[in-house]
Amino acid sequence: MGECEERAQRAPQSRANGVIELSEPPATGALYRRAAMGMLPRLRGRGGDTLPEVELMLRGVTVDRAHLAAYDRVCGFRLADTLPATYPHILAFPLSMRLMSASEFPFPVVGMVHIANRITVERPIDAGETLDLSVRAVDLRPHERGRQLDVVATAWASGELVWRGVSTYLRRERTADGGGRREPGDRPRPPAASGQWRVEPRVGTDYAAVSGDHNPIHTSRVGARLFGFPRPIAHGMWSKARCLAGLEGRLPEAYTVDVAFKLPILLPATVAFSASPEWDFALHDARSGRPHLTGSVR
């Protein structure tokens, strides 16, 4: 463990009424190593049906303009002083990793599947604003392929709620019906494409660098194969951000954007983007029509 990562793990924190206030962002590299160790049977969390009743908070978060510019370039956004809707998710991600890699979290975070994400932008957020962030896990519930839960993140500016994100994660488990697999014949026809994007292998490593999400399924062929993928796969939140970049200039000032992540994008790939006037959008494989993402803006 590097000195800075070790220091981040020892960072002072205060606890009151189930809220843990951190003095600095956790180091995601160290958290991923802890998460990988958590996959060993002797070191896993306690398991069961209980999520930790704790909320992590980090106050006084400011935006690094160079980092924001790098994020914009990786995801296809224009350079601007207003934060993309998906950028506060990046700011809150170290808190989410800290929460989900803790010993009291019931499942190993490595191996959980991000299946859906909802973001509500209450108003445009200027890159010069100072934000207070919070993260908590809620609503552990059944899913046809196991169990799912929500990680809820919020961003506040001067006491005002300006952003909220809900990431839904699936813990795959054997179920009585064998996992509720869909039959190949019931896949809907993909919508007409309004554009195509080439997704190069470096998207996995470039997005990992700006997001802190260094899950090896996105950055390593060996890591991807350990989880059953022939090649690294694109981050789901990169695909959501890329779709919103495709809608840039047409989005309202306040809105909610929902996405469901479908089949992974194996890198490299060519994907087709479609969007309707009613603010529904989708991403699918340009050749086979296999769905990668469906979404809506309201």
Image (spheres, rainbow, N blue to C red):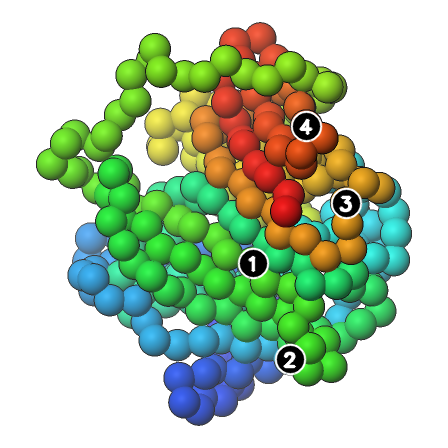
User: In the image, 85: left or right of 172?
Assistant: right
Q: Which residue is mark 1?
A: 165
Asked if 293 appears above or below 188 in the picture, the reply is below
Rendered image: mark on residue 198: none
Is disc 1 surrounded by few (<14), some (14 to 19) or many (20+) residues within 10 Å?
Answer: many
| Amino acid type assigned to the residue bearing label 3 in the image | Leu
| Of callouts 1 and 3, the N-terminal one | 1
Near-viewer residue (166 or 4): 166
Quadrant hosting residue 277: top right
Q: Which residue is mark 2?
A: 59
| Of callouts 1 and 4, the N-terminal one | 1
Observer able to see residue 146 = yes
| Amino acid type assigned to the residue bearing label 4 in the image | Ser
Give the secondary structure at mark 3. Answer: loop
Quadrant hosting residue 282: top right
Give the secondary structure at mark 1. Answer: strand
| Of callouts 1 and 2, the N-terminal one | 2
Is disc 3 surrounded by few (<14), some (14 to 19) or many (20+) residues within 10 Å?
Answer: few
Q: Position of residue 65 (x, y in %)?
A: 84, 59
Q: Position of residue 59 (x, y in %)?
A: 64, 80
| Amino acid type assigned to the residue bearing label 2 in the image | Arg
Asked if 191 appears above or below 52 in the picture, the reply is above
